């Protein structure tokens, strides 16, 4: 979302940002809204269930691959690794962690690791 809006803004200002964001997200939203009422009827179809299972597995694989590539590039020094480990510990210790709490936790660990020596 941020990248789409940023590029739209660079090309045509605020209107460009709005149009770019709308152009990317409106089709997906409309497909969901149009298909959702029919989902119950289709959810019992074995072929549709197999398709959804396959798509889900592919999406999990793609996300895991992207996380691996990003992690290899991001975890380049000890403070970053410690921030990642603190975030992972929070995720594993609680059943449901709100994303803002993850961001605040990572930020606090970053502040503790990078505070100037007294």
Image (spheres, rainbow, N blue to C red):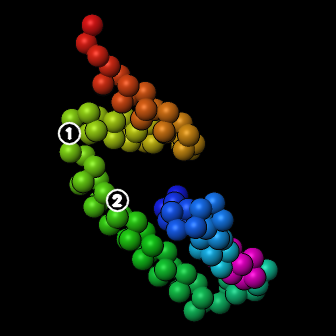
Can you tell which mark lies on residue 67?
2
Q: Which residues are magenta?
A: 28-36
Within 10 angstroms of label 2, few (less than 14), some, or many (20 or more) residues?
A: few
Furthest-right residue in view?
37
Label 1's element? loop
Furthest-left residue in view?
77
- Counting every numbered tag in the picture gives 2
Towards the viewer: 102 or 11: 11
- Residue drawn where x is 38% and y is 71% of the image: 62
Asked whether residue 75 appears in the rendered view, the answer is yes
Q: Is residue 94 magenta?
A: no
- Residue drawn where x is 62% and y is 75% of the image: 23
Label 2's element? helix
Q: In the figure, 42 relative to 112: above or below?
A: below
Give coordinates of residue 4: x percent, y percent. Answer: 52, 66
Give coordinates of residue 94: x percent, y percent. Answer: 51, 38
Towards the viewer: 76 or 93: 76
* Horizontal side, residue 114 vs residue 76: left or right: right
The image quarter containing residue 79 is top left
Q: Where is the C terminus found, in terms of image quarters? A: top left
* Horizontal side, residue 4 vs residue 44: left or right: left
Q: Where is the N terminus found, in terms of image quarters? A: bottom right
Name the residue beneath numbered marker 1: 77
Give coordinates of residue 45: x percent, y percent. Answer: 65, 90
């Amino acid at each position: 979302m941020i990248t789409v809006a940023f590029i739209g803004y660079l090309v045509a200002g605020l209107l460009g940002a709005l149009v770019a964001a709308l152009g990317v997200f409106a089709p997906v939203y409309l497909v969901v809204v149009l298909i959702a009422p029919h989902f119950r009827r289709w959810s019992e179809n074995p072929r549709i269930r197999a398709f959804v299972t396959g798509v889900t597995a592919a999406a999990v694989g793609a996300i895991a691959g992207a996380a691996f590539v990003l992690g290899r590039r991001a975890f380049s020094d000890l403070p970053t690794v410690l921030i990642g480990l603190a975030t992972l510990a929070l995720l594993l210790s609680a059943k449901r962690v709100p994303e803002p709490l993850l961001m605040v936790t990572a930020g606090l660990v970053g502040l503790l690791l990078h505070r100037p020596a007294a």
